[in-house]
Image (tube, rainbow, N blue to C red):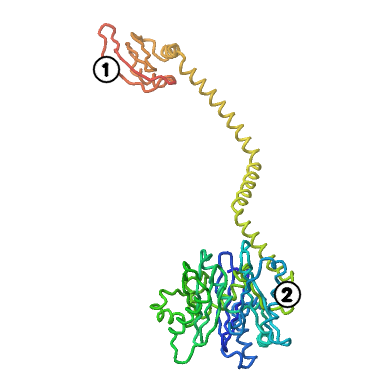
Amino acid sequence: MIYLKTSIGVEIRGNDLLLSCLRSNFSAAVFTRFGRIRDFRTRDRAEVRGEIDQFLKGQKLGRENIVLGIPRQDAIIRHLDLPREVADNLKQVVLYQVQAFEPTEEEKFYFDYASLSGKEATRLLVLVVMIRKSVLDGYLETLREVGLRPLSVMVSSVALANLFLPTQTDPRGKTFVLADIAPEGIEVLALRDRALVYSKRSVKQEGQTLRDTLRREVELAAGKVRLGPEDTIEKIVLTGEESETAQQEVIQDLGDCELLSSGIQFEMPDEQYAHLQEATTSLGLAYSGIVRRPPLKLNLLPAELQVQQTRWAYVPSIILGALIVVLLVSLGFRQMIQEQIMERKIDQEISAITGRVNQVQKLQAQAKALEDRITYLEGRLRNRDTNLELLQELTTILPQDTFLNMYTNRDCTITINGASSSPDLMAKLERSPLLKNVMQRGEVFRDVQTGKDRFTLEAKCEK
């Protein structure tokens, strides 16, 4: 199968590293591979690097488009409500706000932001995501040691939002609550009108059931969203390793909760279905790196640390794409080209035999003219009066003592009646070239007065 683009989502989940590969072809995105590197923080770096290399070499994957997802608890998410007038200088305004959150001059934040307001809104609602420089630098250093250098960095909540929103036909004006449920805790986020309006990661308390923890966090998220009198939560969606178990436990309290995996439209081999629940966040990361315009486009990696993809890196892809287009066009015109080639060959063969065909046609015309002449002559011969010739022939071949009393010619059937003393009269008539099928009609009897035999003979004339 031909893939046009590949993206690898790398999620830091506790002490484990989760990797999901998403590849795009002409029809859809394909979830091709999932891997889990356990205890990557404490294990030998060379050993971890070997597992990652094996994961990538399994499908000949590159390292050019890696999206890193940091845990929600390592990020700070804020929503800024600003007047519309600052839109032209929004970047500087957000920078001032971020500096206000920084605890010291030495402890800086990496950050990025996204405007959540439409063009018609009178005020700007801005989503700001921040992470301490020291924390992200530590993650990046660890990943470099195992051979990974991300092109983009985002928080897990943003990755889940980017994965969920495209599965909804029309999320405008609706509120959704997503819960990522893992053995060690729950991450809950609320989406309203295509925007991330709430996000929190909570650790599961000892002695507290999964049902109680999830119900409490969902109620807290609903309160933070500040729903209006007529607003409701459209649906509650569960994902993560413990999502199927949680769905059965909370169905009575929270209603019919959906699984995020049930709405994912990616193609995938059968063996990847078993990993779909635990891979949702890393899939969201990979999806954010493979689409041109994800719902929330955020990158916490500063420009100076981003891997710059030169224009030459796209040349092989452009050449491959051009070749594919040429092949598809050639396939579409194949039948027409083959017909044209066949027509040219037929024209050449026709030209080669045209001279012989003309000669044959001339001979046919000459033969036809001769046939017409023969037919004409035969018609003339058939229509001529043969009585004179026949009478002359009879006068010549009949003996002197033979005389005729009657001669008739009806449609070339000759009948003669007379008397003769010749015993071989029929034989003489049969030897004539003008007569055939000579036969006797009636009986032969002797005339008493003349002493001759009376006869009646019939014959056909040769035409």
Mark 2 neighbour density, 10 Å: few (under 14) some (14–19) many (20 or more)? few
Residue 135 vs 347, above or below: the answer is below
Image position, residue 392 (x, y; %): 44, 12
Quarter of the figure with residue 89: bottom right
Residue at image position (45%, 13%) is 385
Q: Nearer the viewer, residue 297 or 334?
A: 297
Q: Nearer the viewer, residue 396 or 169?
A: 169
Q: Callout 2, which amino acid?
A: Gln
Image position, residue 77 (x, y; %): 61, 79
Residue under pointer 1: 442
Residue 389 vs 223, above or below: the answer is above
Residue 59 vs 367, above or below: the answer is below
Drawn side of residue 173 relative to residue 255, left or right: right
Residue at image position (55%, 76%) is 198
Could you tell me how far apart the alpha carbons at marks 2 and 1 are, in whole angstroms? 127 Å
Image position, residue 437 (x, y; %): 37, 23
Quarter of the figure with residue 159: bottom right
Q: Callout 1, which amino acid?
A: Gly
Mark 1 falls on what kind of element? loop
Circle on res. 307? none
Q: Nearer the viewer, residue 395 or 95?
A: 95
Residue under pointer 2: 308
Extreme top residue here?
449
Mark 1 neighbour density, 10 Å: few (under 14) some (14–19) many (20 or more)? few
Quadrant where the image shows the C terminus: top left
Q: Name the N-terminal-most of marks 2 and 1.
A: 2
Quadrant where the image shows the N terminus: bottom right
Image position, residue 230 (x, y; %): 47, 66
Residue contact at pointers 2 and 1, CB within 8 angstroms: no
Mark 2 falls on what kind of element? loop
